[in-house]
Image (spheres, rainbow, N blue to C red):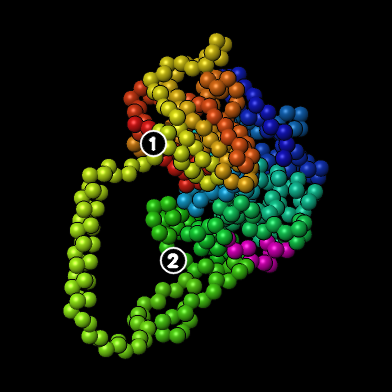
Amino acid sequence: MGVVWRAEDTLLGRQVAVKEIELPDHDLVAVRERGLREARVAARLNHPNVVTLYDVVDDGGRLYLVMELVEALTLRDIVRGSGPGSPLRVATVGLELLDALVAAHEAGIVHRDVKPRNVMVAPSGRVKLADFGIASLQEDTQRTRTGPMGSLPFMSPEQADGLRTGPATDLWGLGATLYYAVEGLPPFDEDGDIPTLRAILTAHPRRPERAGPLTPILAGLLAKQPEHRTSADRLRHQLQAVVHGPADTVPVLGFARPVPSATRPDGGTLAPTQAYTGPVLAPASAPAPAPRRTKRRGRRVLIAVTGVLGVLLVLSALDDRNRPAAGPPAIGDPVRDGNLEFVVDSVRCGVDSVGRSLFRQTATGQYCVVSLSVRNVKNEPRTFSIVNQKLRDGDREFSASIVATMAENGSADLINTELNPEQSAEGVLVFDVPDSVRPDYLELHDSLLSGGVRVQVT
């Protein structure tokens, strides 16, 4: 909605984003005034997971939003380029988005358009939610052009039905966004707008296939009635359980394909989310056959064979004690995450500068230069992105410098490179880290939301 420019705030000397807002043709004055009021309220929302709205400008009847400039990919771009993420990574994203929404709701602000396209994922891994403060303007514009407010297929049933929206509307949008992040497609996406609207209002979402422990959480967020949706506090508890350990048992309701019931040991049936605590019944067994008499000679042979096997096992155990234990993957070892296979060739830290002549870059601390190759080992294209790769020193995590990496490679290779099946790329990643950092692992990812694999670099 509208054009976005990179601009400079000459008064404060900072880079900003300026977005022109398209206004509806009807009630222009009233809509503009209401939009100015809501945008100024949203400008008071200061949260690390929100794209900050600095100001709103009325210039000759045109409205412009002056916002924080975030150089990042959207969640939609990441899923399209790298595929859906693991439940653990998606739960982590969900917690950051939930923090943003709770802060907004406490300030009396409802987003009304939570969707993957409005979720920004910075190179540092920070998640930011964009487009606060323009929901009412979108609502008036879209109602005159396409009907209900919201973005198909992520709008809530109350939006599709033209009813009043509130904080629960944003929780639906969050649920649909997390569904997309872990499944790679929306929960409702039929052939055309009208069938999609009908599905949002009347049908169950398609049952997730990759969500794992997120499945009951998504079901709670995608309840048709706002009052039946999971609360923000409850949702935080559930997402933290996925991140830190087993999730709570929550009924898996409201999906299109029912879970088959299990059979109890006593012959009854067990609902999919219930735990059977009855006695464990051992299966009936036939009476044991009477022991047969064996000859002494056969018994002596059995004892001898058992003795030889015992000696061999002892010798094998002693040999295993002298063998070095298998450690984590190290430099030179091929490792794989998802579709991509990586080989780290070398890691050099303590580098002061990288690049050549006019493109030379100087570290603020020290550069750690990682030489690696990456290959797509699957039968579908995959995008390798610099923002997914992390250098770790204990609990500290560092992202690669895009500018320094481009300077050292002499090109944009390994910044955001699409690899066809069996295609490979090689080059360096450059990390600008404090002088005190002594990295121990390089964490490599197929996508930002994948589980990742660690390579020991010490």
Question: Magenta span covers which residues?
Answer: 198-208
Residue found 68% across the figure and 67% down from its top: 202
Q: Which mark is residue 330?
A: 1
- The residue under label 2 is which amino acid type? Thr
Q: Quadrant of the C terminus?
A: top left
Report if residue 396 is visible in the image. Answer: no
Classed neighbour count for the residue bearing mark 1: other residues with Cα under 10 Å, few (<14), some (14–19), many (≥20): some
Secondary structure of residue under mark 2: loop
| Left/right of residue 436 with respect to residue 362 in the rendered view | left
- The residue under label 1 is which amino acid type? Ala
Residue that mark 2 sits on:
249
Residue found 54% across the figure and 41% down from its top: 340
**Percent of width and height locating residue 85:** 54, 49
Q: Is residue 401 above or below residue 362?
A: below
Q: Is residue 400 above or below residue 84?
A: above
Number of callouts: 2
Q: Is residue 11 above or below residue 63?
A: above
Classed neighbour count for the residue bearing mark 2: other residues with Cα under 10 Å, few (<14), some (14–19), many (≥20): few
Report if residue 363 is visible in the image. Answer: yes
In-front residue for pair 171/141: 171
